[in-house]
Amino acid sequence: MGRVSLKNMVFYGYHGVAEQEKILGGRFEVDLSLVFDMTPAIKSDHLKDTISYEDLYKLVHNVVTDSKYYLLEALAGKIIKEVFLKFSPEKVLIRIRKPNAPVKGVLDTVEVEICRTRDEIEELL
């Protein structure tokens, strides 16, 4: 097994409960890690035998920018579902950060983290 990770992908999206978030949108930072068997890619040195990080980036970009969710949990769940449907990982870990979240207080960012294995994904599909 091996892991491919895309860290701190940044997108502009319209996710949140507050009306202002739905209208003005905001910045979202996403980390995505996939665990899968890299043996075929190690042996062949061919892109067709691995999971392309460019394709992963495009998938995350499309979900974050083309959809609207109230909750970061729902957004993260949608990305995980799409990753399992399009690729064949054994495990996926996603973190979504929302800098400057509209809370009454001072904080750097709000973050949601979800991890699912292939066996656990059925609950999301």
Image (spheres, rainbow, N blue to C red):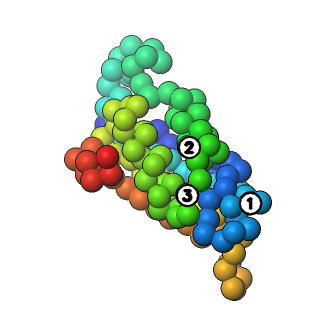
Q: Determine the residue positioned at 39% across, 13% down.
A: 44
Q: Which residue has dot 2 on it?
A: 63
Looking at the image, is mark 2 or mark 3 earlier in the sequence? 2
Residue, far bottom: 105
Q: Can residue 101 be spotted in the picture?
A: no
Residues 111 and 68: in front is: 68
In the image, residue 1 sits, relative to residue 43, either above or below, namely: below
Number of the front mark, 2 or 1: 1
Mark 2–mark 3 Cα distance, whole angstroms, equals: 10 Å
Quarter where residue 24 is shown: bottom right
Amino acid found under the numbered disc labelled 1: Ile
Label 2: how many residues lie within 10 Å, few (<14), some (14-19) or many (20+)? some
Verify CB contact (< 8 Å) between mark 3 and mark 1. no
Quarter where residue 40 is shown: top left
Left or right: 96 in relation to 34: right
In the image, residue 80 sits, relative to residue 53, either above or below, namely: below
Left or right: 71 in relation to 100: left
Q: Determine the residue positioned at 36% across, 29% down.
A: 38
Q: Quadrant of the N terminus?
A: top left
Label 3: how many residues lie within 10 Å, few (<14), some (14-19) or many (20+)? some
Mark 2–mark 1 Cα distance, whole angstroms, equals: 18 Å
Q: Position of residue 48 (x, y in %)?
A: 43, 16
Verify CB contact (< 8 Å) between mark 2 and mark 1. no
Residue, far right: 24
Q: State the mark number for residue 23.
A: 1
Q: Determine the residue positioned at 66% across, 80% down.
A: 103
The secondary element bearing badge 3 is classed as loop
The secondary element bearing badge 1 is classed as helix
Q: State the mark number for residue 93.
A: none
